[in-house]
Image (spheres, grey):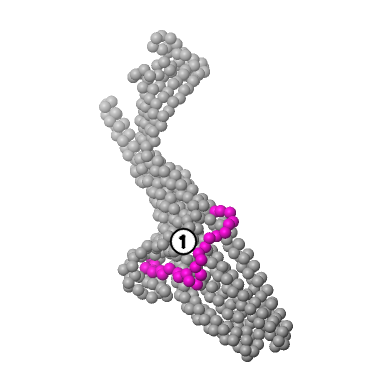
Amino acid sequence: MKMRDLYQREKIMRTNILSSIALIFLVSCAPTFKGEVKDKSDLKLPKDFLLLSKDKDGVTSTKNWHEYFKDEKLRSLIELGLKNNQEINILAQEISISQNEVMARQGEYLPNLSFRAGYESERVGEFTSQGVSDATHTLEDGKPIPKTLHNHRVGLAASWELDVWAKLRNASEAAYYRALASKEAQKLAVTHYVAEVANSYYELLALDREKDLIDSYIGVLKQAKELVEAQQNAARVTSLAVKRFQAEVLKNESKKFEIKQRTVMLENKINRLLGRFPQEIERTSILLEEISPQSVKLGIPADLLENRPDIKKATYELEAAKLDVKSTKARFYPSLSIEAEAGYEAFNREHLYDRPESIFTNLAVNLTAPLLNRAAIKADYFSANNMQLQAIYEYEKSLLYAYAEVTNQISKINNLETIYELKKEQVKVMDDSVEISGILFKAARVDYVEALLTQRESLESKLELVEVKRDQLMSYIDLYRSLGGGWQLTSHQHLVFR
């Protein structure tokens, strides 16, 4: 009868245990997210960029700013700035922080081993059940149990949550992808920084060239003024002509100071980007018009744009968001953990290391799962899904913006190429006009007003040519930035613009 009762009790216990485990797994089912389901592959890029001519002789190549910029002065400025720029240095610290987060996440799914030592002192009341029990018992040597009990404890404690559902592993990988995203953020900052320094540098060269053209123009005006003064003395022209040329000289002298102020401000901007106090910027002696932009070959948009740091950053953040969903979903499932502790424990420190009497051990295996009040986990799970959708939209936005930006720069470069050739022809025609007007003016075949206007229009055409050349160089730099600061062509067929 007793054996049958014992068997029945064990059967009931096993049934209860199995029922409890089944209940745990049943209630651990994650809820269904009812939001939109999207993936980054839903957005398809065009096969080619617009406004390009096909060139099958393109060669696979990689370009970075060292190869892209040939001016040694500019390269030295960029190198100095990359070491000193505060924003880039701040982002470097962000990378270190994200790497530390990866280290912390990786440590979470590894076993935890710690050393523990403690001391307790307890005195129970005489009229409590524990006090009455101690009063009726004695120690092995016949002495009564002390009213104040001491407990000395020293040992090792270990705990380990078994990552059955990859909850911790997914969280670690998500942190890793965010660390990669932080690196891409730094690359993006470097790309924009290099482009800003280069644009400012070429703008500075354009101001130098404008100043030289105005100096040359002022020299011509002074010579013309002397000729007009001579004609005035010969009563061939009035003092009005002299005043007009004198006013034109003064007007352009004031322009020189405007350019000087713009130069100072631009140099200060570059010095700020370099992380140093204002000083003169060393620059090349080559005339701006003689600088040729780098030839650029383009491949398939999907291959090129994936090299942009902002798109890479969005890609890594999307991968991290996907892993966050998996990690959060695993919180609904039962977690299995093991806890163990071993060491020495005694009421008297003299017996603390007596073996085996003072040795203690314990081992526990825990299976836990949320049963009630899972609203917080549901909220985190739904938020993780929403943030994943948000990351997909960010990726699509970055890709659309990047494609439009590159296409705009390609169109701008093509149009500026045409404008520059037309402006060069205009300058040539105006130079011929100046020469003809000078001969006719000396021969009194045209008046001073027409000669002055011809000189002024010639200067304006040359200044416009400088501006177009500056914009042309800047457009190539902006294309370099739009492609992520360097690109690698992987297709056998390439697209090229000239």
Image position of 27 with respect to 116: above or below = below
Image position of 296 with respect to 386: above or below = below
Q: Position of residue 309 (x, y in %)?
A: 44, 59
Examine the residues drawn in magenta and state their main secondary structure. Answer: loop
Total numbered circles: 1
Query: Horizontal placement of 400 versus 203: left or right?
Result: left
| Residue at the image point whose x is 50% and y is 79% from the top | 424
In this view of the protein, can residue 93 be seen by the observer? yes
Q: Looking at the figure, which quarter contains the N terminus?
A: top left
In this view of the protein, can residue 392 be seen by the observer? no
Which residue is more in the foreground, 11 or 381?
381
Which picture quadrant has residue 277? bottom right
Say what amino acid the circle numbered 1 marks: Glu
Which residue in the structure is indicated by mark 1? 72
Q: Position of residue 143 (x, y in %)?
A: 43, 9
| Residue at the image point whose x is 48% and y is 58% from the top | 76
SS type, badge 1: helix
Magenta span of residues: 275-302
| Residue at the image point whose x is 48% and y is 66% from the top | 478
Which picture quadrant has residue 343? top left
Query: Horizontal placement of 317 versus 261: left or right?
Result: left
Which residue is more in the foreground, 188 or 306?
188
